[in-house]
Amino acid sequence: MSEQNLVTTEHLNNGVEMPRLGLGVWKTDNASAKQSVSEAIQHGYRMIDTAKQYGNETGVGEGIREGLEKSGLNRKDLFVTTKVFNGDQGYQSTLDAINGSLKRLQLTYIDLLLIHWPVDGKYIDTWKAMEQLYRQGKVRAIGISNFDVEHMRNLLDHADITPVVNQMEFHPLQQQKDVLKFAQHAGIQIEAWSPLGGGEVLDNPTLQKIADAHHKSVAQVIIRWDLQRNIITIPKSSHLERIQQNADVFDFELTDAEVETINNLDEGKSSLWYDDFAWHNMKGEGIPDTVDTWYDSPEDYDK
Ligand code: A2P
């Protein structure tokens, strides 16, 4: 049985240690983000993942402040990720945008800054700015998100610094094996977003059977599978009981056969293809008006 816990880290390619299990806050408003983040820190979580695009950096910042205070921890005990908003991509705009994120998060540095999406024609310039922010010490590590193999190849052709992480959609039904293979070969750590498939994987009968065998929930089995695959994972929940449950994954181990069974569930099925917002972003077309909790322009996020 492994002796891991919420403090256990993965060694990134620049020497920075990143906790392997953290809290995601996508689709969480400011008030709820504050509460979830504060409760998660008090419950032992040491890594929080947000983005300007989520519109909740302010709530996350308040949650971090409260969580650290109530648990008697310091800023350095926590690992905070945020991302460069599509509308901010480009060299100077990325340099400028970090100040807004730092202010909203009430932080003096970011642990990990990611390019949120590979916006066509811009992501190389964005990366150059992030390399600069890294050299300035405003961020401890820089990485990418939602990059496919071609995006990674192109970035590596132009980059001075190899990304530490590619955060991608990864769950039993969507495993993007080509991306995983390329990233791992290049020394880029994979981090799973929507590890529970946005909740849609939780009624899968195969996973339920494995969960029953371990007296665990399907969510716990998936998180455990991520950890055993050395994939950093950030399940999202706005409920304390689930936040606790999702961290209670260090007292059991999946067998090799169970890991293999889950590996074989891959259908290449993204939870995004049905989502107007995400589809437009994937194609770098900006944010449609139809999703009312998401803002249209970078300025809206600076409020
Ligand atoms: P909620 O926030 O209401 O708890 P993902 O991280 O893949 O995006 O999945 C997040 C979704 O899964 C959210 O809808 C969240 O709901 C739900 N969820 C998170 N943890 C659990 C859990 N342990 N059991 C059931 N549903 C969960």
Image: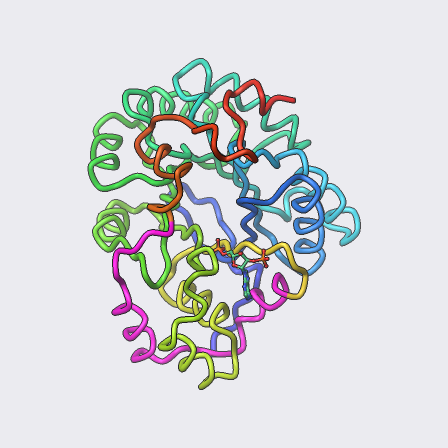
Q: Position of residue 138 (x, y in %)?
A: 54, 27
Residue span colored magenta: 242-271
Count of numbered marks? 0
In the picture provided, is 111 more to the left or to the right than 145? right
Is the residue 81 above or below the residue 24 in the image? Answer: above
Residue plotted at (37% across, 37% down): 144
In the picture provided, is 31 more to the left or to the right than 168? right
In the picture provided, is 260 more to the left or to the right than 133? left
Ligand 1 placement by image quarter: bottom right
Q: Quadrant of residue 248?
A: bottom right
Tell me if residue 282 is in the magenta stretch.
no
Q: How is this picture coloured?
A: rainbow
Comparing 212 with 43, the one in front is: 212
- Farthest residue toward the front? 290
Comparing 242 with 97, the one in front is: 242
Looking at the rendered image, the quarter that the C terminus falls into is: top right
In the picture provided, is 164 more to the left or to the right than 53? left
Comparing 285 with 172, the one in front is: 285
Residue plotted at (72% across, 56% down): 42
Comparing 201 with 140, the one in front is: 201
Residue plotted at (72% across, 39% down): 62
Q: Position of residue 169 (x, y in %)?
A: 37, 50
Q: Quadrant of residue 104?
A: top right
Tell me if residue 268 is in the magenta stretch.
yes
Q: Position of residue 240 (x, y in %)?
A: 68, 61
- Farthest residue toward the bottom? 213
Q: Quadrant of residue 281?
A: top left
Is the residue 67 above or below the residue 59 in the image? Answer: below
Q: Position of residue 290 (x, y in %)?
A: 47, 32
Residue plotted at (20% across, 37% down): 150
